[in-house]
Image (cartoon, helix red, strand yellow):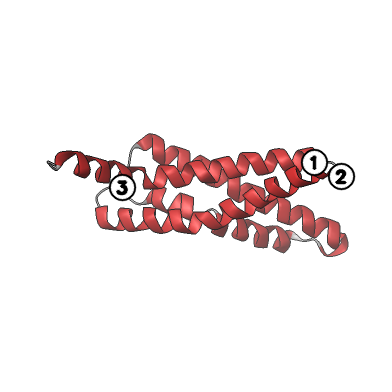
């Protein structure tokens, strides 16, 4: 996997995991401000790390383990479809509210669009080597 792809996956993991951690910590503060502690922040940090795992795990596996890298990329791409759907539902919900006349929440819409784009592009980055391999295999075969 190229270094640029690894860097993009790591930066995307920081963005998506940080969003989950920040959103969760904000929720904890707003629901129970008197019980908000460092433990709450740690829990949401772990949750953000777990959500971002399909991004940072394949980025950290060295190229000298090609089978592990291939499996982690494909599993990561499949698992990454869940946060993509989650963030995409934020976009769909806000667009439907805007179209129905109820008004969309601009900040949630922008966050949803950015995170959906990041997750969808990371799925592409994760499966791109396999797509290239399949395309080269199909062009090498004579008809």
SS under mark 3? helix
User: Looking at the image, is mark 3 or mark 1 earlier in the sequence?
Assistant: 1
Image x and y of residue 35, in percent = 83, 65
Q: Residue at x 70, y 57 (%)?
A: 41
Image x and y of residue 25, in percent = 74, 55
Give the Cα separation between the discs numbered 3 and 1: 39 Å
Q: Nearer the viewer, residue 71 or 46?
A: 71
Q: Residue at x 68, y 41 (%)?
A: 111
* Residue at which label 2 appears: 102
Image x and y of residue 108, in percent = 74, 43
Are dots 1 and 2 in contact, CB under 8 Å?
A: yes
Whether residue 129 sits left or right of residue 5 in the image: it is left
**10 Å crowding of disc 3: few (<14), some (14-19), many (20+):** some
Q: Which mark is residue 130?
A: 3
Q: Nearer the viewer, residue 80 or 44?
A: 80
Given the current orientation, which residue lies at the most extreme front position? 143
Looking at the image, can residue 65 be seen?
Answer: no
The quadrant of the image that shows the C terminus is top left
SS under mark 2? loop
Give the Cα separation between the discs numbered 3 and 2: 44 Å
SS under mark 1? helix
Are dots 3 and 1 in contact, CB under 8 Å?
A: no
Q: What is the number of callouts on the image? A: 3
Residue 99, quarter of picture: top right
Q: Nearer the viewer, residue 38 or 62?
A: 62
């Amino acid at each position: 996997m190229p270094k640029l792809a690894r860097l993009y996956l790591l930066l995307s993991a920081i963005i998506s995991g940080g969003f989950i951690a920040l959103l969760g910590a904000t929720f904890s503060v707003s629901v129970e401000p008197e019980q908000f502690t460092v433990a709450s922040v740690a829990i949401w940090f772990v949750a953000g790390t777990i959500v971002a795992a399909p991004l940072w795990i394949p980025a950290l596996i060295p190229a000298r383990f090609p089978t592990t890298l291939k499996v982690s990329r494909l599993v990561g791409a499949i698992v990454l479809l869940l946060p993509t759907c989650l963030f995409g539902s934020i976009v769909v919900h806000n667009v439907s509210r805007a179209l129905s006349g109820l008004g969309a929440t601009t900040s949630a819409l922008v966050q949803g669009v950015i995170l959906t784009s990041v997750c969808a592009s990371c799925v592409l980055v994760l499966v791109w080597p396999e797509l290239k391999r399949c395309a080269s295999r199909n062009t090498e075969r004579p008809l």
